[in-house]
Image (tube, rainbow, N blue to C red):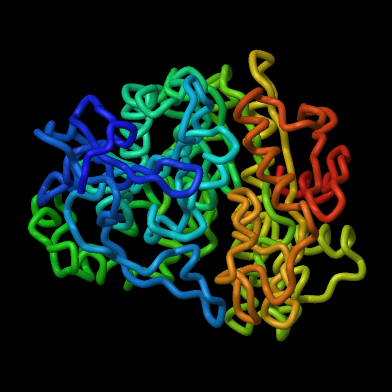
């Protein structure tokens, strides 16, 4: 292939050749850290060795070891990708940039997937719309599952989060060569990726590497304690037939680590002092004895502008595709509350009072929504808004997908095609797809996408800032409506 000068970029590690796709230049599979081989899978990320010549950055690369992930009858390949694309050199970034321009805003995206799945290869993370609108988009892979998040004695915790910080360091060092402004970087993520973004806000080593952050359906209260993490480590060691020691884990192949991770569902992580912040949905999360919201309240990332929000019916994703939503009973509502709150009876009473017309299915989903994302997002917003050096904004995405016989609603993940302005993709439509059989309102995706970019450019998405008194929140649907503390009664039940 001929080396066209406008497609060549020289990074600190070596030169890469990208490709022109429409109005964008794309650079795929650029290493930001060394391949995590053997014992290095459980070590901090290390610098990638330089290379000679020109590295081909026109084809997708490998991704983190993972098993194929399904969610009942919902087609989630656009979200999770097609599974594990094998190869050791997977700590990489994709860069999508306009064909011209310098000092452009930079947005760095951290994918979701329950800390065990996902990658830059997913359809939903196509950055062409960002490049079209004058943004340099960077997406990244990070270590998952046991390699990324299992708390192993002798190894640093939260290695997947350390990967994200290393990727931000790479961006700081190299993004100007792609037309980006290293002084105007917005870190954003969704689901597990959003919880990681919250963790990065609470990480001193990341200070100065980004200016703004967007937390989409994450949680500032989503970390496991050390005691909880040790239960998972013990279970993983038992599944592998080894002792919970670093040397023993280092001898295990990636294939066996992935298989063991898939066997860890259902561990009871509730303790005398802490609930399970993921209510049993994943055995992996950040491991921190101080939650990110508490660290942010103490002043970490006080100079970073923050946009934080959730979807109106997050919990539907974990019920509707499995056929467990419509048949929900009062006992199911009580069980969801018992998993989520130290006073489940009071919690159920609060939700019944605030939603007097709700069915058992709607109450169950609403409690799960707040247990997983809502309460922790509000806590993060409250913590951040207590510092005057930067701005805080809140949103709720409420457009309901008619997928799965109209039941999916504004579930977890439904906002992503709007943020990336990809609602024209045919793969997202159908009876069992994320957006369902019907097109969303004309202009909604463009407005959401433009709002995210406006925040990245200016730190202001276009509505009243959130403060601990008013808690102003923008509800995003066919119409956008701003209100103060829209779920105050339910919020108080969690605090």
> Could you tell whether 347 is left or right of 452 in the image?
right
225 to 365, vertically: above or below: above
- Left or right? Give the position of 235 relative to 172: left
Q: Nearer the viewer, residue 493 or 255?
A: 255
Residue 164: image quadrant is top left
Name the quadrant containing residue 40.
Answer: top left
- Left or right of 34: which side holds 488? right
On the image, the x and y values in percent for residue 139 come to: 42, 44
Q: Residue 372 location, x and y as percent?
A: 60, 55
Q: What residue is rendered at 34% in x and 68% in y?
A: 83
Residue at 11 percent across and 53 percent down: it is: 250
Where in the figure is residue 274, as x and y percent of width and height? Answer: 52, 50
Q: Is residue 290 visible?
A: no
Between 134 and 344, the one lying in front of the other is 134
Q: Quadrant of the C terminus?
A: top right
Is residue 332 depicted above or below 281 in this figure?
below
Numbered-mark total: 0
Closest to the observer: 481 or 128?
Answer: 128
Percent across and percent down for residue 71 are 51, 75
Residue ID at (69%, 15%): 388
Residue at 10% across, 56% down: 248
Q: Nearest the camera: 487 or 226?
A: 487
Q: Residue furthest top?
A: 389
Could one spot residue 72 in this view of the protein? yes
For residue 175, above or below residue 240? above
Q: Along the horizontal axis of the image, is 144 left or right of 393?
A: left
Q: Quadrant of residue 333?
A: bottom right
């Amino acid at each position: 292939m001929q080396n066209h000068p406008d497609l060549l970029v020289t990074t600190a590690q070596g030169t890469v050749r990208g490709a022109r796709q429409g109005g964008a230049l794309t650079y795929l599979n650029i290493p930001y850290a060394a391949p995590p081989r053997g014992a290095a899978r459980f070590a901090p990320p290390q610098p990638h060795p330089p290379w000679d010549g020109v590295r081909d950055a026109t084809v997708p690369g490998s991704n983190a070891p993972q098993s194929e992930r399904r969610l009942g009858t919902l087609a989630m390949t656009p979200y999770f990708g097609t599974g594990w694309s094998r190869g050791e050199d997977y700590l990489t970034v994709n860069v999508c940039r306009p064909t011209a321009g310098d000092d452009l805003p930079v947005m760095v995206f951290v994918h979701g997937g329950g800390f065990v799945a996902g990658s830059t290869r997913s359809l939903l993370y196509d950055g062409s719309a960002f490049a079209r609108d004058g943004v340099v988009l960077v997406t990244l892979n990070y270590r998952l599952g046991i390699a990324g998040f299992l708390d192993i004695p002798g190894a640093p915790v939260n290695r997947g989060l350390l990967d994200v910080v290393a990727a931000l360091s790479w961006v700081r060092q190299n993004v100007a060569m792609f037309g980006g402004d290293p002084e105007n970087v917005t870190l954003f993520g969704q689901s597990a990726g959003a919880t990681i973004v919250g963790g990065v806000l609470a990480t001193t080593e990341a200070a100065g590497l980004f200016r703004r952050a967007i937390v989409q359906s994450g949680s500032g209260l989503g970390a496991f304690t050390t005691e909880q993490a040790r239960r998972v480590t013990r279970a993983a060691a038992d599944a592998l037939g080894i002792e919970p020691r670093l040397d023993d884990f280092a001898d295990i192949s990636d294939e066996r680590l992935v298989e063991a991770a898939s066997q860890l569902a259902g561990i009871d992580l509730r303790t005398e002092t802490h609930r399970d912040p993921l209510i049993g949905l994943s055995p992996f999360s950040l491991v921190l004895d101080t939650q990110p919201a508490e660290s942010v309240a103490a002043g970490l990332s006080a100079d970073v502008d923050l946009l934080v929000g959730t979807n109106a019916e997050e919990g539907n994703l974990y019920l509707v595709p499995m056929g467990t939503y419509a048949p929900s009973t009062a006992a199911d509502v009580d069980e969801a509350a018992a998993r989520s709150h130290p006073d489940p009876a009071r919690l159920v009473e609060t939700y019944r009072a605030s939603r007097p017309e709700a069915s058992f299915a709607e109450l169950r989903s609403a409690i799960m929504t707040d247990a997983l994302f809502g309460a922790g997002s509000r806590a993060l917003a409250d913590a951040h808004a207590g510092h005057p050096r930067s701005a805080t904004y809140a949103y709720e995405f409420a457009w309901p997908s008619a997928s799965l016989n109209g039941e999916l609603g504004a579930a977890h993940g439904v906002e992503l095609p709007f943020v990336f302005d990809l609602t024209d993709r045919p793969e997202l439509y159908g009876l069992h797809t994320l957006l369902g059989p019907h097109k969303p309102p004309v202009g909604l995706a463009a407005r959401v996408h433009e709002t995210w970019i406006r925040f990245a450019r200016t730190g202001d998405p276009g509505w009243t800032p959130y403060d601990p008194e008013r808690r102003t929140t923008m509800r995003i649907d066919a119409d956008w409506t701003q209100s103060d503390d829209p779920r105050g009664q339910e919020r108080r039940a969690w605090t």
